[in-house]
Amino acid sequence: MKAKQKPAKSTSAKKKRYEGFTDEEKAAMMDRVQEQKIAARKADGESVALAKIAELPEPDRAIAKRLHAIIKGSAPALSPTTWYGMPAYTNKDGKVVCFFQSAQKFKTRYATFGFSDQANLDEGGLWPVAFALHKLTAAEEARITALVKKAVS
């Protein structure tokens, strides 16, 4: 009877182990699970979005409140909701068109206002879909209004 040969031990360095998601990423995923449960119960998305805005630290809270007013005024067809724990706005099919991300929640230098692939912003072969927000002046508000209107056109 022949003995089976054992494979030779590898002398190569071990691969670096993936440490997993950060606490912020885990919290965002948990928020997303809650959002899906709320959507399944057909809860009022605006009250949930406003509650999330109220939880944000300043200055992100002020920016999110102003964005909410701008979006509601310039694109009434969009419905407020939350997406990964942040305020977002969906089309009539329930798909996210635009969203806000807090600088403090994700420990970044600036907040972000972004658009999904549902937004009609296509312009040639390359176009921006996310914008850094440090503060909102009249000029930024006008640009956001124009972008939101174009996104839902």
Image (cartoon, grey):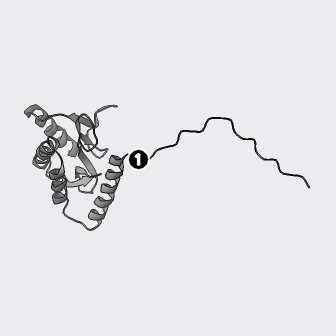
Quick check: 152 above or below 79? above
Pointer 1: what residue? 21
Is residue 38 covered in magenta? Answer: no
Amino acid of disc 1: Phe
Q: Is residue 110 above or below residue 6?
A: above
Q: Quadrant of the N terminus?
A: bottom right
Whether residue 35 sits left or right of residue 58 in the image: it is: right
Percent position of residue 16, x then y: 53, 39
Give the image quarter of residue 14: top right
Residue at (57% x, 39% y) in the render: 15
Judge by depth and name the residue closer to the eye, 94 or 52: 52
Provide the secondary structure element on which disc 1 rests.
loop
Stretch in magenta: 10-15
What main secondary structure does the magenta stretch of the protein show?
Answer: loop
Give the x, y percent position of residue 48: 19, 58
Q: Position of residue 53 (x, y in %)?
A: 17, 50
For the point 33% across and 31% down, the residue is: 126
Residue 139, above or below 18? above
Assess disc 1: are there few (<14), some (14-19) or many (≥20) residues with their C-alpha within 10 Å of its C-alpha: few
Residue 37 place in picture, x, y as percent: 30, 64
Nearest the camera: 77 or 83? Answer: 83
